[in-house]
Image (spheres, rainbow, N blue to C red):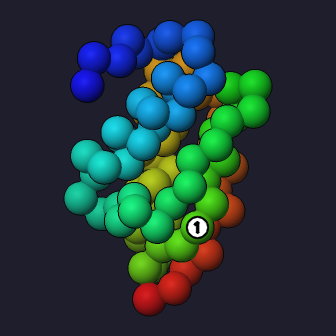
Amino acid sequence: MGYQKGGGAEADLVELVEESLLEDEQVRSQWIEVSREEGVIYLRGRAPNARAREAATRAAARVPGVHAVVNELEIHP
């Protein structure tokens, strides 16, 4: 989509994390809200199981510029 990895804009980092979630087959990202505060990514919403919840954490963490991930996803099968 033309985003530059490692960009400083908060919105760009959130969009990169959203892209990473969409690319992961284990994550149902339409149920995940992504927000950012000072390089920390917050994941809120729901996941169908623990495996998908952990996959969301890994997908967000691998984005350059993400310093930490706080996963607040609730499991709802």
Nearer to the camera, 40 or 15:
15
Locate residue 26: give its quadrant. bottom left
Name which residue lies at 41% across and 70% down: 51
Is 22 on the left or on the right of 58, as rendered? left
Nearer to the camera, 3 or 39:
3
Query: Can you name the residue that lies furthest to the right here?
Result: 38
Is 4 on the left or on the right of 37, as rendered? left
Q: Residues within 10 Å of mark 1 (few under 14, many from 20)?
A: some
Whole-percent x and y of residue 40?
69, 34
Q: Which residue is mark 1?
A: 45
Q: Amino acid at mark 1?
A: Gly
Local secondary structure at mark 1: strand
Whole-percent x and y of residue 56?
45, 55
Locate residue 67: give its quadrant. top right
Name which residue lies at 44% across and 89% down: 77
Whole-percent x and y of residue 39?
68, 26
Name which residue lies at 24% across and 59% down: 25
**Above or below 21: residue 12:** above
**Above or below 53: residue 10:** above
**Above or below 17: residue 50:** below
**Above or below 45: residue 67:** above
Name which residue lies at 51% across and 85% down: 76
Whole-percent x and y of residue 66?
58, 27
Check the picture and name the quadrant holding the N terminus: top left
